[in-house]
Amino acid sequence: MDTIGSILEMCLIVDFFRGGIPAVYVDFLENLAVGAIIYEVQAIDPDRNDNILSYSVNSSLVTIHPSGKNGAILVAKPFHYEKDFHRFIVLVTVKDTVGNSIYGIVVVTLIDTNDHWPIFKQNETVFEVSEETPPNSVIGKVTAHGSDEDGVLSNLIYVMSTTNQYFTINSVTGELIVSAIIDRDSKPFRNVPTQQFEVIAKDSLFGEHAASMTVIVIVTDINDNQPFCFPHTHSIQIPETIEKGSTIVTISCEDNDVDLANSQFTISLQPALRAAGRFALDEKNNDTIVVIGNLDFEATAHLEGNHVYVMSVVVTDKAHPHYQDTVTVYVTVTPVNEFNPSFTQTSYTFNISEFSEIGTKIGQVLAEDKDLPGLELIYSLVGGGSTLGYSQLFWINPASGEIHLVAQPDYEAIVQYLLTVQAVDKDSNDPKAATATVTVNILPANDEPPDCLPKFYSMMILDDTASGTNIQGFQLACTDHDSSPQSFRYFITSGNINNHFQLSPSAGSNITKLILALPFDYTHGVDKVTNYNLLIQITDDNLLAGSRKRKVVQTGRVKINIRVIVPTPSTQETMTTPNITYIRLSQNTYQPDSWYIPLVITLGCLLLLGMLGYLADIYMNYIRSIPKSKLEKKPLVEEKEPKSKKQHNVILEMITHNTIFDGEAVDPVTGNVYQYNTNSGARRWKDTKLPMKDYGNVRDATPNLMSNINNKTNFAQNSNVKDVSADQTENQKTDNVQTSLRLASKLGKQNKVTGQLLEPPQTLNSLSQVLPKRV
């Protein structure tokens, strides 16, 4: 059995020889069992050596060892710190056998022991904490109680069963403390707004006795987030034709606060310059902006603006402190191609002379676009204007609408053109177009010379022909390819020596006759020339010739060769050498690649003509010098046919000339274009594949010419060499033959002619007759 001295390591010796009552202080634990020694009193009796002493105490809480002889003080009852006195005094009496006694005092202090488990009065406790609470803030306190008394055990240690990053506990006081910032609107609190953990109260560091309690912390939401809109800027383009009530933009905003009361907000549209009355928030859904006004570009009220509207949308929290966010909306109204272009006139009429030069401006068409801003227009010709092999006679400036000539017009081909002009606006998405009709009248001009066929005539007349006689029934018929009335003036410009010949009528008709105005007088020497080469000039009397704008008179030319037959009386018979007649037929050809050949031939002909003129002048002077007395005259009626006919040989020689076609005209019958030589009158189709009509075709005229030659053989013995032109018609050849026969019957045979007189050659062909080459 343990003694109190061993527990407290304390020993008390009562010394009776000192004065007073000694006292001893003893502590013991409440959980000592009954009979346990709390203190042992030791006493000595100096008078006796046996030390037979008896001990006693005056308290019921303790007792003396049952032997009574031992000074051990024992626990008499169970002690409870929570119920018993925590301190009491025990008076110890010691007696010897004779009755002497001594007293001592033992002060006993009860020490509480850990003999009960700590407890929490509730199994669970709940705390609330607002988000964003600063760290180290105390949100609550937990307290454990002991079962020994109702008070709180002060020696408990509080700990959390698991580590929590947001909360911690004071191990001494049991206070719950915030250890980190809590955001209710983020994970994990956004989905689960509570934190649950276990708090343990231990009676010692090692936890021999412990109790636990569940702690739940609820995190509450506060209005700590402002409304957030994305995007903050809207740039929108809408057409001017958008209907009223159409939604142009939806404002997308959110509030991150979890609590509904903290996440609600209002949207308002702030007044903006020129946007009032045109845009507003939808009444049913106030996060959308709709069109409520007119945005037409053509409206007068919109002409001063640039059609860009800026609006501010303010989003405000309903809960305090009413955070805000602002959204800026840019609305650009784009034009729409609503209207078709329109021409200032539904139709245009322009007049232009066929003399107009290429590139001449005919007129201008103008269209406008009612759309604002106005679109640029492009003009084009979509119909009409083709003629004479040209796909387009006109050209229009695509920017200005001016119409110009690109080819020479011809009134005789087409007098009026109906053009279709189109104006298209420059809208890449939806181009619109308009058309107008343009009438172009071609005004006639005198651009065609009179055309007389053939260009050369050869006739014979007797020297005693009476004045006023139509020479061989000659009639000159001319045409003018101009569409104006055909009326001509006729002039004999050269070769009319002594003015023997006259054209009647001289003006106002397209047909005229050659009249002998004055008779010939070769007897008295008034007339000496027997071969007349008349150059007839024909001018048109076109009505346009008197125009103030442009006086143009076209001229045509015709050559007429007239041989006057003068009888040469003679009675002398003579033997003549065989007469050779050269007939030269000309065929017009054209070789464009041999351009130098016509040039060389032309220069050679000019030199040859000069030489021939000089020889002809010498020859004419020789004829005039022969006296007339040398010629014997006999009556023609007494002449007899010679016994032998002189030999008459005919030599046919083909000469090919390279002809340059320096003019073009349109055939009024076929409408085809042909080329012609203004000097020779030769023609050919411009398109060489077309068949050519018999305009003086030499090949076709050759058989008739040969037949005429055979008919004139008898007369050719006493006549000079005759030049037969390929341009003469068959009727004129017949007239010449009849005239030759009539003259032959009148003249008869000339006998004993001292020499045959040859008239001077007048053309290149007659030169070959004067100088015949041997066959």
Image (cartoon, rainbow, N blue to C red):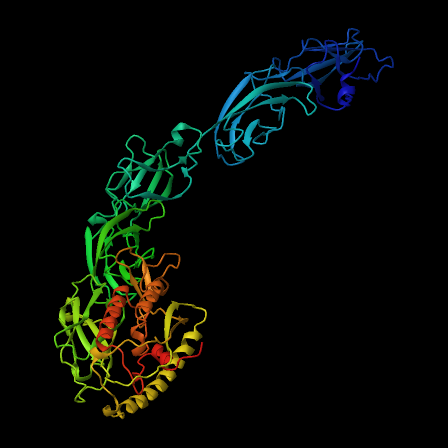
**Residue at 54% from the left image edge and 16% from the top image edge:** 122
Residue 179 shows in the view:
yes
- Quadrant where the C terminus sits is bottom left
Q: Residue visible at 36% across and 72% down?
A: 583
71 versus 403 height, above or below: above
Q: Nearer the viewer, residue 660 or 699?
A: 699
Q: Quadrant of residue 515?
A: bottom left
Residue 155 in view in this figure: no
Above or below 416: residue 726: below
Pick the quarter of the image with the N terminus. Answer: top right
Residue 269 lies, with reference to residue 455, above or below; the image says above
Residue 714: x and y in percent read: 30, 72
Outermost residue on the right side: it is 49
Q: Which residue of the protein is positioned furthest toward the top in this rendering? A: 66
Indicate the position of residue 536 as horizontal and vertical percent values: 22, 75
Quick check: 371 above or below 761?
A: above
Q: Position of residue 156 (x, y in %)?
A: 62, 23
* Location of residue 568 by image quarter: bottom left
- Residue 402: x and y in percent read 26, 60
Quarter of the image holding residue 247? top left
Q: Residue at x 37, y 63 (%)?
A: 699
Would residue 743 appear left or right of 75 to someone viewing this image? left
Nearer to the camera, 315 or 668: 668
